[in-house]
Image (cartoon, rainbow, N blue to C red):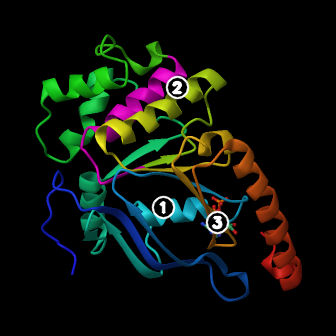
Amino acid sequence: MFDRKRKPGSRAAEALRLVSVSKVYGTGDGAVTALDGVTLSLPRGSFTAVMGPSGSGKSTLLQCAAGLDRPDRGQVVVDGEEMSGGEAALTKFRRDRIGFVFQQYNLLPTLTVEENTALPLRLAGRKADRGSIRAVLTQVGLGERLGHLPDELSGGQRQRVAIARALVTRPGVIFADEPTGALDTRSAREVLGLLKETVRLHGSTVVLVTHDPVAASYADSVLFLADGRLAGHLPAPTAEAVAERMTHLGDRAAERRADNGPLMEV
Ligand code: ADP
């Protein structure tokens, strides 16, 4: 059985487990199976990229695994605790166990770097100790920017605040959804390098959803999705190997849709 009493901070060896997770949008003829029985297990301290053609279910996987949406079937276990209960329980679950980094940073414009970083702790009713907030901001290279507002920072720096904000609660899993989508190449590399370092040095677990093979190559391994199912796994990825796999996945997904007729078109 899963340990329901596990406190954030005491860690399970398995950071994320999905068991037969399925999600269907709509009903009848218009129903779309976005996830079709996905089972996976990610150890603590791993950095995994999730890739797949457009419409393969990446966003749905992230939404279900991060507790932003509920699967129709299956089980999601984060850091040893199964996601369950009503809306309030789900919100608490997310606050305690999950960190988010989005493409658009989602920082509050009127709060300073330090206040934005402390926000998840305050929302969770946990003590926002200044020393540890500053330590996290120093870790992401923003120790000198504590009092600045988001407007006064570059895109790369804003994303580093978002990473600090995700780290500060010491979540079981950090989900990063196209975190470099709005950044120039150099800032993108810095942000990806920072995520990698976070995993190496601090044992965080990161799941990166991306369509970019270069971004995926920063991960320890890549999971491929096609038509809502896991369609392969690539350890120690290079950008070239990821791009190559993606080309073939695209071919196979198109072939399957052609076989299934126009109703399956996405
Ligand atoms: P990806 O992130 O890989 O592009 P998504 O998870 O967004 O894929 O979508 C998977 C499938 O589910 C697609 O066919 C998409 O059109 C469908 N889908 C996603 N969200 C919805 C929704 N809210 N309503 C209906 N269909 C949806």
- Point out the stretch of residues depicted in magenta: 154-174
Q: Decide if residue 54 is on the left or right side of residue 255.
A: left
Residue 186 percent across, percent down from the top left: 61, 21
Name which residue type carries label 2. Glu
Ligand 1 neighbours mark 2 (CB distance < 8 Å): no
Element class at badge 2: helix
Q: Amino acid at mark 3?
A: Leu
What residue is pinned by disc 3? 225
Q: Quadrant of residue 66?
A: bottom left
Relative to residue 264, is residue 94 drawn left or right?
left
118 or 76, which is in the foreground? 76
Label 1 sits on what residue type? Gln
Instruction: Judge the density around disc 3: few (<14), some (14-19), many (≥20) Cα neighbours within 10 Å.
Output: many
Which mark is first along the chain, 3 or 2?
2
Q: Which mark is residue 169?
A: none
Quadrant in which residue 24 is drawn? bottom right
Queried whether the magenta region covers residue 72, the answer comes back as no
- How many numbered marks does the figure carry? 3
Q: Is residue 4 left or right of residue 225?
A: left
Q: Which numbered mark, 3 or 1, is in the foreground of this view?
A: 3
- Circle number at residue 190: 2
Q: Percent x, y for residue 250?
A: 80, 62
Q: Are marks 1 and 2 in contact (CB under 8 Å)?
A: no
Other-residue count near label 1 (Cα within 10 Å), few / some / many at <14 / 14–19 / ≥20: some
Q: Cβ of disc 3 within 8 Å of ligand 1?
A: yes
Query: Which of disc 1 and disc 3 is earlier in sequence?
Result: 1
Residue 139 in view in this figure: yes
Quarter containing the C terminus? bottom right
